[in-house]
Amino acid sequence: MNDADASEARPGEGAIRFSHSGYRYLLGFGTDFFGIWDREQPGGPVLRFPRTDEGWDRAWYEYVSREKHNVEVLAPGVAYASARTRGRWARGLLYLHVAGAFATACALVFEVVRLAGASAGSASLLREIEEQTPGLLALLFFIGFYPAPAAIAWLLWQHRAHRNLAALGATELHYTPGWVVAWWFVPFAVFVMPYRTMRELWKASDPDAGEAAWKQLPTPRLLPLWWGVWLGGLVFLVIAAPFGRAGDVASLTTEAALGVASALAIAVAGVLAARVARHIDARQELRHAKVGSSIGYMIRPPT
């Protein structure tokens, strides 16, 4: 271990949850072991025991021989409630959103072709297209990009999943379940903060991470890819807006072409968002299974 690693190490590493705490020693468990940690020795446990009935008995007796004056560490007050059902609804509605965005892209491609053909048509046809196209494009943008059911389902799922982090033993969280929803409605912050809350949700749901060790986990490439594609779709949409106000065929063609790029980006972002939700649900279920299998031993210490 180099000096930098030593300075960053701290007692309790590798622990998913502690069951008992004393003046110097802590008793808890990791992914596949029970352990005793020394507050004065940074890093992992000083003693490990297999995560079995016999292993728990040995860990308990070794612990009380070292730390007679200990107290039970109470489990978080928030109970775990699986987010899988909400996740399925969110993913299903996201895929409907993807279908709508893709249909919008196809409709806008048709508009690009129609506008390109009209540039050589009669003056009356040009006037007709110039009068009708802006309203049509506005309707297509609205239908393709603002599916309220998918947005509501996503927020309900994200709130439940983030609320589970405390029940799964994660500590040192920066965001509350309420704020992970609220950040989506804060101007300007909406371009950064929802991504950061999702990053915390992903890392803290890791089935093998300790109570606070999740903070050192790397960010998966899926998260920035999803967020970057979604922001790209919004950027194309913002750039397209001024062209529609110009009213001439060339501007309308540019608006429609940018709309195609925006719609396709939004569709891809929807698919990536569904994958993010599915992975987080799977991680939480696995972490819950691991935490629950150890909590069973710790309900009542051996006598």
Image (cartoon, rainbow, N blue to C red):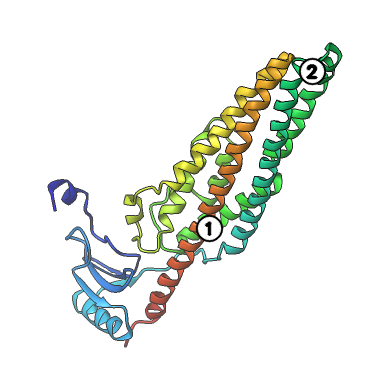
Q: What crowding class fits label 2: few (fewer than 14 Cα within 10 Å), some (14-19), or many (20 or more)?
A: some
- Horizontal and vertical percent position of residue 125: 84, 17
Judging by the rendered image, the residue that carries numbered circle 1 is 278
Residue 263, quarter of picture: top right
Closer to us: 200 or 40: 200
- Horizontal and vertical percent position of residue 97: 67, 46
Q: Is residue 109 left or right of residue 122?
A: left
Residue under the image location 64 percent in, 23 percent down: 240
- Image height check: is 204 above or below 115? below
Q: Residue at the bottom extreme?
A: 303
Q: Is residue 270 left or right of residue 52?
A: right
What amino acid does circle 1 point to? Arg
Q: Residue at the top extreme?
A: 123
Q: Secondary structure at mark 1?
A: helix
- Horizontal and vertical percent position of residue 157: 59, 55
Judging by the rendered image, the residue that carries numbered circle 2 is 130
**Cα distance, mark 2 to mark 1?**
44 Å
What amino acid does circle 2 point to? Glu
